[in-house]
Image: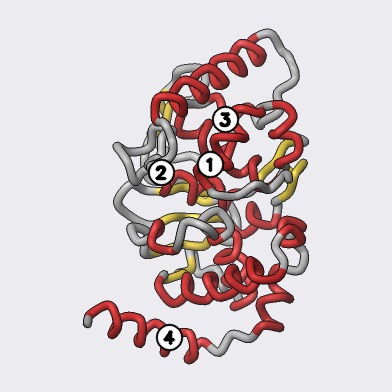
Amino acid sequence: MFKQFNNWLEKRRIKAMGFTIEQWESAIADWPVMNRYQGTERDTLRDMSFHFLARKGVTPGADFQFTEAMCLKLATMACVPILHLGLDWYDHCKTIILYEGDFITNHPYQSEDGVVHAEGRGLSGEAWQRGPLILSWESILETGAHARHGKASNVVIHEFAHKLDMLRDGANGAPPMHPDMKPGEWHDIFTESFQHLRMDWQHHKHLPLDEYALTNPAEFFAVCSETFFEDPKMMKKEMPDVYRLLCQFYRQQPAP
């Protein structure tokens, strides 16, 4: 009974928002990834993005004045990874804070030289275990297969991948496995790939991913996820085993 009532409320919210197909198409027109989704999948993504905005609160950071088109684009990028998983996978994320540019965190951090800085650093995105997800609109615009140092970038997919990762034992690079997946295989392949790329990086060899992926297993999964959707052909060629496991997890094959 409560589920039916919540569904009714959600549909009322969507109707009140008044989004149209034309608005949505215009908002996502400049994102090449959407060319991959046509027919029923495209319709599902559009409907899912409307429901996403009905369930989540998008609030401005530092008085940033965002538009409905920005929200529609953000929502669609967030929904692409869960197209065949379902919106319930994001139930633990209620609020998205959207800044115009990078934002300064309110917690200390340790730089690569080992120095601990009392003041926060500027970030383009951040996902909290029990809290909101924070994004920079300028970073959302810097999306593409070669957007970050020539490597794939999508801050929305990156941060929501962290949220999926956090569903099981915190952010450790191992999201909840589906019944037909083997956690041991995931651990072995991701660990081997992570260590192999770290060795390549230490020897100044070319990396298929942005080197930020080598920060820790959680960032490795997040960077792999954004690369999986933004540059799947490269990932399938350079990291076939990781690509195969991400196909199993996300229930998609972006590089047919």
Marks 2 and 4: in contact by CB < 8 Å?
Answer: no
Q: Relative to 245, is 39 above or below?
A: below
Per the rendering, the mark at residue 248 is: 1
Foreground disc of the pair 4, 3 = 4
Task: Please tell me in which quadrant of the rendered image residue 72 appears.
Answer: bottom right
Q: Residues within 10 Å of mark 3 (few under 14, many from 20)?
A: some
Foreground disc of the pair 4, 2 = 2
Q: Position of residue 44 (x, y in %)?
A: 58, 70
Q: Secondary structure at mark 3?
A: helix
From the viewer's side, name the closer residue of 10 and 26: 10
Q: Quadrant of the C terminus?
A: top right
Disc 2 from disc 3: Cα separation: 24 Å
Q: Earlier in the sequence, mark 1 or mark 4?
A: 4
Q: Secondary structure at mark 4?
A: helix
Q: Secondary structure at mark 1?
A: helix
The residue that disc 4 covers is 11
Q: Position of residue 131 (x, y in %)?
A: 33, 55
Q: Position of residue 122 (x, y in %)?
A: 53, 43
From the viewer's side, name the closer residue of 197 and 7: 7
The residue that disc 2 covers is 178
The residue that disc 3 covers is 213
Residue occupying the point 45% across, 69% down: 59
Q: Secondary structure at mark 2?
A: loop
* Number of residue marks: 4
Disc 4 from disc 3: Cα separation: 39 Å
Residue occupying the point 45% across, 44% down: 162
Disc 1 from disc 3: Cα separation: 21 Å
Marks 4 and 1: in contact by CB < 8 Å?
Answer: no
Marks 1 and 2: in contact by CB < 8 Å?
Answer: yes
